[in-house]
Amino acid sequence: MKLRQLGRFGPTVSAVGVGCMPMSGTYGTSSESDSIAVLHRAVELGVSLFDTADIYGQGHNEQIVGRALKGRRDRVVVATKVGGVMSRDDKWTSGFNGRPEYVKEACDASLGRLGIDVIDLYQLHRVDPETPIEDTVGAMADLVGSGKVRFIGLCEVAPSDLKRAAAVHPIATLQSEYSLIERDIEREMLGLCEHLGVGLVPYAPLGRGLLGGSITSDTKLEATDIRRSGQMPRVATENLAGNVALAQVVADIAAVYDATPAQVALAWLLSRRSWIVPIPGSGPVEYLEENVLAPDLELDPRDMRLLEGLATQVRGDRYGAEGTAQAALVSPARPTP
């Protein structure tokens, strides 16, 4: 597995990581034993970045990651998140809390669930609209000073937030959605990350299943799958056929290279910057084994140009108006002091 450094301040990790959120049933039924087997295989293949969050499955996700990586701690970089308040009635959050005291309490709770002494990458899941980001990042910096955290990251923040946070403490990473069909980050944030030396950790790099081919026009999503809830218009009935047609372009290119569509989508993303490390969601072992080969795939300039135009043709917004907690996780309104 090839390695990459996450920006100027972050750790060196495998070029492709694993997003662990699906292991808590977000995209339908999941099996703990299967999830742990996937994580064990990932470590065997040289994957070292594993991303979770305290609100995934109301702490369940961190527990799985902790159990799976026990005895493998020296070979992995554990990334988790703080900021979303656990909710008792859904899998997401009842709000946002970036108060210093909450951040420190949540860190201790995450350390306990993960069964580790230090969190390698502690990320602010979303900005608390009631708490200046300087206060939140200041608390995270205190955790670095106390030895409970090694690196600090942010998720889905505005450019102004990133600048303000970086003035308090070096920011190792930004986590944001980025893929062949979701490229809003290129407007300003990608250049800002480069300027500030912040590594990028794209989530949903396979368009939530569209680009990898796991969603087709005939796919029937489980009742518990958040993609069925109306929160994600790109897989809604009125948009699905058009977006599946875009995914077919990726599949056709993949066939030329004797590769999978997921490998092509990840290879394109890796080509954007040397400090980008995507975290495709955990799935079957065979998907993992395909994904880790993406860093070795070099795409022809002509194929790159074909892929470049897909984002302009995508149908539907990233999140729908009825997306409640998940839509709110994108960019809550917040005052500027």
Image (spheres, grey):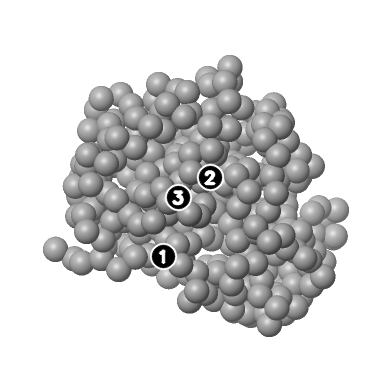
**Is any atom of residue 145 visible in this view?**
yes
What residue sits right under mark 2 in the picture?
Answer: 57
Mark 1–mark 2 Cα distance, whole angstroms, equals 17 Å
Residue drawn where x is 75% and y is 72% of the image: 244
Q: Of the residues under marks 1 and 2, which one precedes in the sequence?
A: 2
User: x, y percentage for residue 183?
Assistant: 52, 68
Label 1: element kind: helix
Residue drawn where x is 60% and y is 52% of the image: 26
Q: Quadrant of the C terminus?
A: bottom left
The residue carrying pointer 3 sits among few (fewer than 14), some (14 to 19) or many (20 or more) residues within 10 Å by Cα, namely few
Q: Which sits in the foreground, 171 or 227?
A: 227
**Is any atom of residue 301 visible in this view?**
no
Q: Decide if residue 117 is on the left or right side of residue 211.
A: left
Q: Of the residues under marks 3 and 1, which one precedes in the sequence?
A: 3
What residue sits right under mark 3 in the picture?
Answer: 88
Label 3: element kind: loop
